[in-house]
Amino acid sequence: MSKVLLVNAGPHKEGNTMAALSEVAKQLEKNGVDAEIVQVGVKPVRSCIACGQCRAKSLGRCAFDDDVCNRIVEKMATCDGFIIGSPVYYGQPTGAALSLVQRLFFSAGPLFVNKPAAAIAVCRRGGATAAFQTMNMPFMMMNMPVVTSQYWNIAYGRDPGEAAQDAEGMQTMRTLADNMAFLLRKLHAEGAPQYPEREAWNPMNFIR
């Protein structure tokens, strides 16, 4: 059975971001895909300080082990897809969402490469598309297929539970789950997926 890890980068366990992620998780389960939601909560999430220790020491995880980051790294070792959801703060994802993804991908990138991914933005009124675009950009740098839906993965609501009243938003979440399950079935239809052979990275700095 395939498994998808969903991360709630909002502070509220019963908030609207959780409502959107829960709708996705329920639909994944209906498609025969195991789903687990990790709640970031209100504890501090470190930003990457570019110490480089994760790579210099080949840790396969972040050098700092005092927040949720490495717990997610451990879970991704047995997961086939990744979804992150965040409320919108000033037209952006939460600071926790940004810090978490940057550290996850830099320290444990091989666990994410080639795995289908999606982002979900939840807002009261505006800024959702900007936050949604911001969360999608790292996926493309990690060779992660971005899973689509019938619309951008956005739900609307302010007070807890209001997002569940966004009929189109919830339908968008279910369609996202259906598409994620479809892609995972195709990738794993005949055993281990045969990913493209890629060229070695050829970085170039414009200032020399």
Image (tube, helix red, strand yellow):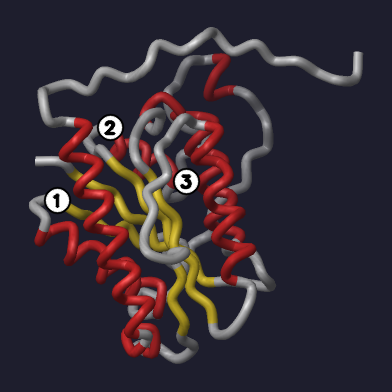
In which quarter of the view is residue 126 placed? bottom right
Q: Is residue 202 left or right of residue 144?
A: right
The picture places residue 95, in percent across and down from the top left corner, at 61, 59
N-terminal of the pair, mark 3 or mark 2, is 3
Residue at the spot of label 1? 34
The picture places residue 4, in percent across and down from the top left corner, at 25, 47
Asked if the residues shown at circle 1 and circle 3 are in contact, with their CB atoms under 8 angstroms apart, the answer is no
Q: Residues within 10 Å of mark 3 (few under 14, many from 20)?
A: few
Q: Quadrant of the C terminus?
A: top right
In which quarter of the view is residue 49 placed? top right
N-terminal of the pair, mark 2 or mark 1, is 1
Q: Nearer the viewer, mark 1 or mark 3?
A: 1
**Which amino acid is tagged 2?**
Ala
Residue name at image x 46 percent, y 62 percent: 9
Kindly identify which numbered label has been placed on residue 66. Answer: 3
Residue at the spot of label 2? 77
Q: Nearer the viewer, mark 2 or mark 1?
A: 1
Position of residue 45 relative to residue 87, above or below, is above
